[in-house]
Amino acid sequence: MTEIVGHAPIFLGLLLNNQNNNNGNNPANNNANNGNGTVIVHEQIAEVLYSGGAPDLPNHALALRLRAESPLSQVSGLTQTQCRSYYENGYLVVPNALTISQAEDLLNQAHALKKHVSEGGEGIIRHNVSSQRSKTPSPVGRILATFEPGDQAPNPFTRRIARLGCGVHQLPSFRDITRSLFNHSLASDLVSIHLGYTNPSITQSQIIAKLAGVGGRITSHQDGCVSFTDPPSCLTFWYALEDCMVDNGCLEVAAGTHLTEPLRQRLVQSEDGKPRFIDLAAPVWAQEREKQRMEEVKQEHIYTPLSVAKGTLILFHGNLLHRSGFNKSSRSRIAYTFSIVEGDAKFPKDSYMMPQGEGGKYERL
């Protein structure tokens, strides 16, 4: 099996080896994460053109059905116990956030979208960015597909699709799930370590397909390096559209690292459109008061696999270290994920995920 050393938490299919770990200065880290590494962009990218829904995909009828059905977790807020668990651990597992039929509907749309990309034709633009002179399309607000490197199909554009994003939330059904009252409630309840969300804003969204037998290992990283603000405010919503177990590469988290590991890098755009990480002038901590104490502590990170059923939501802080293993099973592991930040927080104008349109503002949740 081809070993994929890592994906960035954005869709574009960045492959990296310890480039986004932000813990390279800690010698006690897991050996699997050692190495310097570089950012590599997939050579082939397919773009889906859409207007109110991609061609031949279920859209408004499905969106209405999703909107009418219970859960999303009955639109109730979190308990104090859940908020405390998130505060201490940096993540929270919410079972049954979606009904089975809601998860199935979204999964079917994900498969339909992948099929549409694979077949090509109207509404699909194929970009070959293998040349050093080629310009890489920005994923912001668009639906781009990258392909599974472990799939050895002769035509690279017919390889199985690994990721779709970063504007998946603009498709009607995914938009309704993303902007649900339930997710608004969670953004209000979780103060992202003392930073209350007054203007929760979406930075990116993606469909992640860890494919049966070829889905690669994702090295440890922090989503806050891509959805970067100072102070950190990134919160990721990770919806399991299929059962996610150890053998098909479930999410693994290092509990508490949102407090013990600051952000040390952020993602910017090069002149050729390709992404690259740059070092921060100073580490950015989720809580400034942890800085002095944790700079003197060297910890070995212990990762816990989160085996979850279809319809489960995993929430995690942007500073939390997380990863996933190979998919060695005969079952795929497909998830829908999006990240938000506090829209009124301070963020650099050269951020890779910065909107290019008028005003340069992220879309409000």
Image: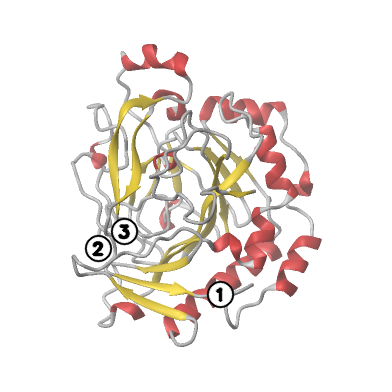
Q: Is residue 298 left or right of residue 72?
A: left
Amino acid type for the residue under numbered disc 1: Tyr
Q: Nearer the viewer, residue 346 or 185?
A: 346
Q: Would you identify the image quadrant in which residue 98 lies?
A: bottom right
- Residue 333 appears in the rendering: yes
Location of residue 35 in the rendering, given as x and y in whole percent from the top left corner: 18, 41
Q: Earlier in the sequence, mark 1 or mark 3?
A: 1
Residue drawn at x 38%, y 45% as measured from the top left? 350
- CB-based contact (under 8 Å), mark 2 and mark 1: no
User: Would residue 330 be visible to someone looking at this image?
Assistant: no
Q: Which residue is identified by label 1?
A: 50
Residue name at image x 45 percent, y 24 percent: 259
Q: Position of residue 327 (x, y in %)?
A: 38, 59
Of the residues under marks 2 and 1, which one precedes in the sequence? 2
* Disc assigned to residue 30: none
Residue placed furthest toward the bottom: 121
Which of disc 2 and disc 3 is earlier in sequence? 2
**Residue type highlighted by circle 3:** Gly
In three-dimensional space, the C-alpha distance between marks 2 and 1, rounded to whole angstroms, equals 33 Å
Marker disc for residue 2: 2
Q: Residue at position x 45%, y 35% from top?
A: 320
Report how far apart the C-alphas of labels 1 and 3 lie in the structure. 22 Å
Work out whether 56 lies above or below 111: below
Note whether 64 is above or below 140 in the view shown.
below
Say which quadrant the N terminus sits in.
bottom left
Residue that carries the numbered disc 3 in the rendered image: 273
